[in-house]
Image: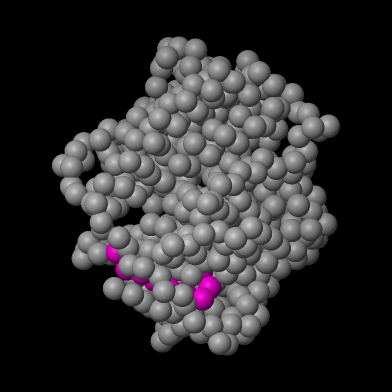
Amino acid sequence: MEIKTDFLVIGSGIGGLSFALKASELGDVVIVTKKEDSESNTNYAQGGIASVMAKDDSFELHVEDTLKAGDGLCNPEVVRRVVETGPGCIEELIQIGVRFTRKRGKEGEFDMGLEGGHSKNRVVHAADLTGREVENSLLSAVKAKKNVKILEDHIALDLITQHHLKGYRRKPEEKTKCWGAYVLDKEKKQVLTCLSKITLLATGGAGRVYIHTTNPSIATGDGLAMAYRAGAEVANLEFIQFHPTALYHDKGDSFLISEAVRGEGGILRLKSGESFMEKYHPRRELAPRDVVARAIDHELKKRGESCVYLDITHLDQKFIKLRFPNIYGKCLSLGLDITKDWIPVVPAAHYICGGVVTDLEGGTGIENLYACGEVACTGMHGANRLASNSLLEAVAFAHFSAASARSALSSMKDFSFPPIPSWSLEGVFDQQEWVIISHNRDWIQKFMWDYVGIVRSNRRLEQARRRISILLDEITEFYKINPVTYDVIELRNITTVAKLIIECALKRKESRGLHYNIDYPDKDDKNWLKDTVLQSEKE
Ligand SMILES: Cc1cc2nc3c(=O)[nH]c(=O)nc-3n(C[C@H](O)[C@H](O)[C@H](O)COP(=O)(O)OP(=O)(O)OC[C@H]3O[C@@H](n4cnc5c(N)ncnc54)[C@H](O)[C@@H]3O)c2cc1C
C-alpha cells in the first residue's frame, strides 16, 4: 500500500508534534508513531523546560550556563538562537493549553525551578509531570487539525532515498534525497510506502541500547540508525548522560529516583552498609551527576555487585511521605518501604547528546529530511546537556524546521515522486529462529553497560567493536531473510547505534564532558575541540 503526503513526521513526542502543528498550516501531515501516540520520552519528563522568564535572569546567563555544561563543544550560534527563542516557545505552549505551575498567591508569575548547572531559577514546569502535560496538550492540538493523520502502532523501518530506485547508480557529488519512509503496520503486518515531500525524524533517544536506562521502551535509536543507513552524518554519540540513581528492581523498569532524595540527605551505601561518596568528592552525595554516576560505577565494578543503596531511613517518616509521595508509592508497590528499607539504585542511561547532524534550520545532509529533538545533533548540547535544555531544544528546532520547510515546500510546486518500488518480500522466508532476537537484545544491553558504559578504556572499546561488528553482520543477514517485525527492526537499530557509539568513543582520544576514558583521562583542547562525525558509504 502507498500513502502520499506533503509532510511525514516520524515520532509523536514534543519534537514531532510541535513540528506537525506548524506544518499543518502548510499542507497535509501524516504522523507515524510506533506505539500509542503519547508513549515517548517526552511523556516521562519530570523537571521542566529551561527558559529565561524571570526578571533577574538574562539570555546571556542562560547561554553562558549552557556553554559551560557543553565543555567546549556547543555551537554558540545555535545556543543563542535556541535560548532567545525559548520564551516565545513557552508562550506558544501556553496558547495550546499547557498549564505551567504558577507561584501561589502571585497571579501570573511562574514557579521557576532551579536545577544543577543553572545560575538562576529558570525551569518552567507543570508540577513534576511537565512532560505529560506538554504531550497531552500537543496531542489535543494536533488532533484538532483535519489535515493531520496519526498512525499509531506503525514503525518506520527505513528512509526512502534514490538508493531504492531500480537500477540506480550514484552520480558523483549527487546529494541524497529523501522521499519518505517504509513503515510497518503492526496489526496488518504490512509494509506501507509512505511518500512525502518533506520528512521529519523525531524518533527520540536511544537509552534502550543499555540494560539500565530511564528511557521507555520506544527509545531504541531508530531514527539515528535509519539516517545513518541513508547516508546522513551522525556525531558525538559518545556523549551519553547517565543519571546516577534509577531504581534497581526487576519490576521497577526505568523508574527515576530523583536527585532531590540526595538533596534531602539521602546517603549512598554499599551492600555492607559502608558509605563511599566521601572518597570521591567533598560534596559527597551532592557532587555533580557525572561524578556520582562514576563513583557508583567504580564501586560496582570493583566488587562485582549489581546495585548500591540509597538510605533515607534516618529522615522523619512523615516528611518522606510528604516530600516524595510518588517515589514512596512506587517503591511500596514493589514491596519496599523507603522509610525503613534502603532503596536499591544503579546509574542509568538517560540522554544521548549526539545524533543526526543538522544545520541551523534542522536540515540534515539529506535533501528534504529534517531532524529535531533527541535524535538530532544540533550543536546545542556539546559534550554535556544542561538540565531541562532538551525539551527547549526540541521545541525550538521544530519551529526552525517548520519555517525552513515552508520555503522548501513552496519551491516544489511541480514536484512528482519518482517510481518508488514497494517493500520487497523477495527471498524472505520465516526461519522460525526468533529466540535469537530476545537473546541478542539482552546480550547487547548488558554488554554495552559493561564495556561502553560510564567509565571506558581502549581495551574494552576495542573488544566491544569486534563483537558488535560480528553481531551486526549476523543480524543484518537475519533481517534480510526473515519477515520484518518490530523486534527485528529494533534489534537491528539497537545494534547499529551500539556500533556507532563505540566508533565515536574510540575516535575521541581524550576525556571530555560525559565521555570518560581511563587511557586518556585528560581533556585535549589542542586536538579534540571538535565533533566526532560518522557517515556510512553509499554506493
Ligand atoms: C525520565 C525522564 C525525565 C526527563 N526529564 C526531562 C526534563 O525535565 N527536562 C528536559 O528538558 N528533558 C527531560 N528529559 C529528556 C526529554 O524528555 C527528551 O529528550 C525529549 O522528550 C525528547 O523528545 P523527542 O520529541 O525528541 O522524542 P520522544 O519524546 O522520545 O518521542 C519519540 C517518538 O518517536 C516514536 N518513534 C521512535 N522510533 C520510531 C519509529 N521507528 N517509527 C515510528 N515512531 C517512532 C516514539 O514512539 C515517540 O512517539 C527526560 C527524559 C526522561 C527519560
Q: Could you tell me which residue is drawn at 50 percent across and 28 percent down? A: 465
Is 193 part of what is drawn in magenta? yes
Name the quadrant containing residue 421: bottom left
User: In this rendering, would 93 be left or right of 441?
Assistant: right
Magenta stretch, overall SS: strand
Total number of numbered discs in the rendering = 0
- Horizontally, residue 114 falls left or right of residue 455, namely right
Name the image quarter holding residue 112: bottom right
- The residue that appears at 42% across and 42% down in the rendered structure is 494
Residue at image coords 70%, 42%: 531
For the residue pair 482 and 204, the one nearer the viewer reads as 482
Bounds of the magenta segment: 191-199
User: From what the image shows, is residue 390 above or below residue 263?
Assistant: below
- Residue appearing at x 29%, y 73% in the figure: 1
Q: Nearer the viewer, residue 327 or 25?
A: 25
- Residue 440 appears at what percent x and percent y? 32, 33
